[in-house]
């Protein structure tokens, strides 16, 4: 009987230890739990281009109903192309800007939307500062075209966002978007584009800080504008070159990677002249694939940097390989 009692006592001790262990584990798990943070790292990414430092800057993302916005293609084909990339419409679409540090100049290409394109955008300025720069340091601002998501960030309230900078835009876009006659003649849905251009560009004109150019123009050593008229009357891309390395900053030459790389003829309702926009896109694709230079595009998934490769009748997009900088 004594042995049986001792056995039962040992069993009870083991059970108590197991229960105690479960309680301790539960307590540790409860203490280890934390609320979800649900924020990302600041939206900037850097690469070197010869002697130039290029910083991609995110303004955020916006959900676009691309299966109704894209043209010269059926809705079914759009949905199929998106699904192939595990995407759907509305498509979360990046809005990117780029900062070029030549060593002598700080040049900004596009500025994001600020408050002109909805509440999910407008993060450009915070990301510029997170990247180590202040808006007062910017020497020149180049705008690809005068749509709100590219030039809305030119203003902070009633003040110029970059008070020490010169603003460069193709004269054709200035003539078109700042025209009262064109605004009056535009469909109601388009009038907001004109109003946004007037609000963002007008103060720069008044301050004497707008310096337009006409077509292909050398702007500073290593940076030139290239006319790609179509998406807007004065749409321009910017070619950057240092020590034989080249980068093309495309603006809105294209919008939806999952569709328009495979089928470059696909256009979008935002185009002022869709036929010209498609022609410019096809020419730019062919040159980029043939020469192999780097591309930065406003609406490719951030940071929007990569290369093109010719594939069958279309192209494939090859994003840059991630390569962090640690202040070397």
Image (cartoon, grey):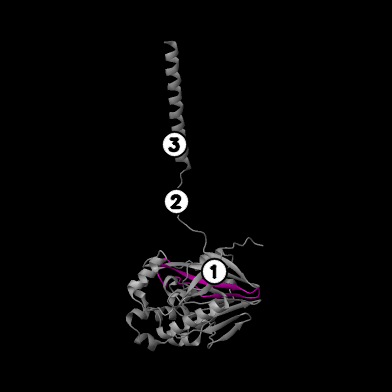
Please state the horizontal and vertical placement of residue 131, each as a whole percent of the image.
Answer: 57, 65
User: Which image quarter is the N terminus in?
Assistant: top left
In the rendered structure, which disc, 2 or 1, sits on the residue that comes first in sequence? 2
Q: Which residues fall within the magenta stretch?
A: 92-120
Can residue 273 be seen here? The reply is no
Q: How many marks?
A: 3
**Residue at horizontal 43%, vertical 72%?**
256
Residue carrying label 1: 56
Q: Residue at x 46, y 46 (%)?
A: 34
Mark 2 burial class by Cα count in 10 Å: few <14, some 14-19, many 20+: few
Circle nearer the N terminus (2, 3): 3
- Mark number, residue 26: 3
- Measured Cα–Cα span from mark 2 to mark 3: 20 Å
Q: Is residue 96 magenta?
A: yes
Answer whether labels 2 and 3 touch (C-beta < 8 Å).
no
Instruction: For the residues labelled 2 and 1, say whether their Cβ atoms are less than 8 Å apart.
Output: no
Where is residue 216 drawn, in percent x and y? 55, 86
Q: Quadrant of residue 6?
A: top left
Tell me, for residue 36, which label it has, or none. 2
């Amino acid at each position: 009987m004594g042995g049986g009692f001792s056995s039962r006592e040992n069993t009870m001790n083991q059970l108590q230890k197991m229960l105690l262990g479960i309680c301790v584990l539960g307590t540790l798990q409860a203490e280890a739990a934390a609320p979800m943070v649900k924020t990302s790292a600041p939206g900037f990414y850097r690469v070197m281009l010869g002697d130039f430092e290029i910083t991609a800057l995110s303004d955020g993302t916006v959900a676009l109903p691309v299966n109704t916005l894209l043209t010269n293609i059926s809705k079914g084909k759009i949905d199929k192309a998106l699904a192939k990339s595990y995407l759907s419409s509305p498509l979360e679409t990046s809005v990117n800007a780029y900062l070029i540090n030549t060593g002598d100049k700080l040049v900004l290409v596009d500025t994001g939307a600020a408050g002109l394109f909805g509440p999910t955008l407008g993060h450009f300025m915070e990301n510029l500062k997170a990247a180590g720069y202040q808006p007062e340091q910017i020497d020149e601002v180049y705008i690809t075209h005068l749509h709100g998501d590219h030039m809305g960030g030119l203003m902070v309230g009633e003040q110029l966002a970059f008070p020490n900078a010169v603003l460069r835009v193709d004269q054709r876009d200035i003539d078109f978007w700042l025209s009262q006659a064109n605004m009056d003649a535009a469909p109601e849905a388009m009038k907001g584009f004109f109003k946004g251009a007037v609000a963002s560009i007008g103060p720069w004109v008044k301050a004497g800080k707008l310096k337009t150019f006409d077509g292909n123009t050398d702007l500073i050593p290593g940076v030139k504008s290239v006319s790609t008229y179509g998406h807007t009357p004065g749409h321009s891309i910017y070619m950057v070159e240092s020590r034989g390395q080249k980068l093309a900053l495309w603006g809105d030459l294209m919008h939806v990677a999952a569709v328009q790389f495979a089928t470059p003829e696909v256009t979008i309702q935002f185009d002022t002249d869709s036929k010209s926009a498609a022609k410019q896109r096809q020419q730019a694709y062919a040159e980029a694939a043939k020469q192999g230079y780097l591309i930065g595009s406003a609406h490719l998934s951030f940071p929007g940097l990569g290369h093109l490769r010719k594939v069958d009748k279309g192209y494939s997009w090859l994003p840059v390989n991630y390569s962090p900088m640690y202040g070397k």
